[in-house]
Image (spheres, rainbow, N blue to C red):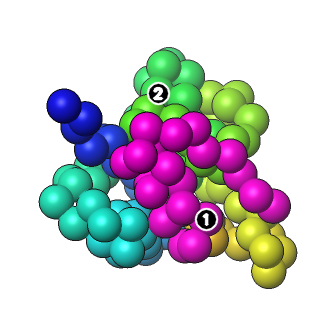
Amino acid sequence: MMFPPRIEVLYIEDCPQWQAALHLARSAARMAGAAEVDVFAIEVRNRQQALRLGFAGSPTILVGGRDPFPGVRTGRLACRVFQTPRGPAPLPDGGQLTDAIRAALAGRPFTQSA
């Protein structure tokens, strides 16, 4: 039996975009057909936790433990910038996130399409 992927939004309190990222992740899960999937918000409080969780800046969205928008994981507690089809942005592209969740639901690997 295949279980739906766990979706996590990793954030630091100082970055204002984390709540919008949480909303985006929930919306993308619904669009991907995974409305029953819980999306967890996890506050990252120190460098060690950041490194352990694969934090690439706030927000980092993990789908099944993987970041569909790989970034440099330095352990820095800082805001993140995503490369989207429209250029740099404080949130990832919703369509790309939906595609990543669909791929995870189907048990396929996902790749970032710039």
What segment carries the magenta color?
A: 94-114
Q: Quadrant of the C terminus?
A: bottom right
Left or right: where does residue 1 sit relative to residue 74? left
Q: Nearer the viewer, residue 57 or 109?
A: 109
Q: Quadrant of residue 85?
A: bottom right
SS at badge 2: helix
SS at badge 1: helix
Query: Dot 1: few (<14), some (14–19), or many (≥20) neighbours within 10 Å?
Result: many
Left or right: where does residue 1 sit relative to residue 76? left
In the rendered structure, find residue 9 and report the number of the disc placed on it.
Answer: none
> How far across and down, in percent of the image, does residue 109 sit?
57, 38
Q: Is residue 56 above or below residue 36?
A: above
Residue tagged 1: 96
Q: Residue at x 62, y 29 (%)?
A: 75
Residue tagged 2: 53
**Residue 10 seen anywhere in this rendered image of the structure:** no
Q: Which amino acid type corresponds to the residue marked 2 in the rendered image?
A: Leu
Q: Quadrant of the N terminus?
A: top left
Q: Nearer the viewer, residue 1 or 86?
A: 1
Q: Quadrant of residue 110?
A: top right
Query: Dot 2: few (<14), some (14–19), or many (≥20) neighbours within 10 Å?
Result: some
**Residue 53 seen anywhere in this rendered image of the structure:** yes
Q: Nearer the viewer, residue 67 or 10?
A: 67
Residue 25 part of the magenta-drawn span: no
Q: Residue at x 33, y 42 (%)?
A: 5
Q: Residue at x 68, y 46 (%)?
A: 111
> How far across and down, in percent of the image, does residue 53 sit?
46, 27
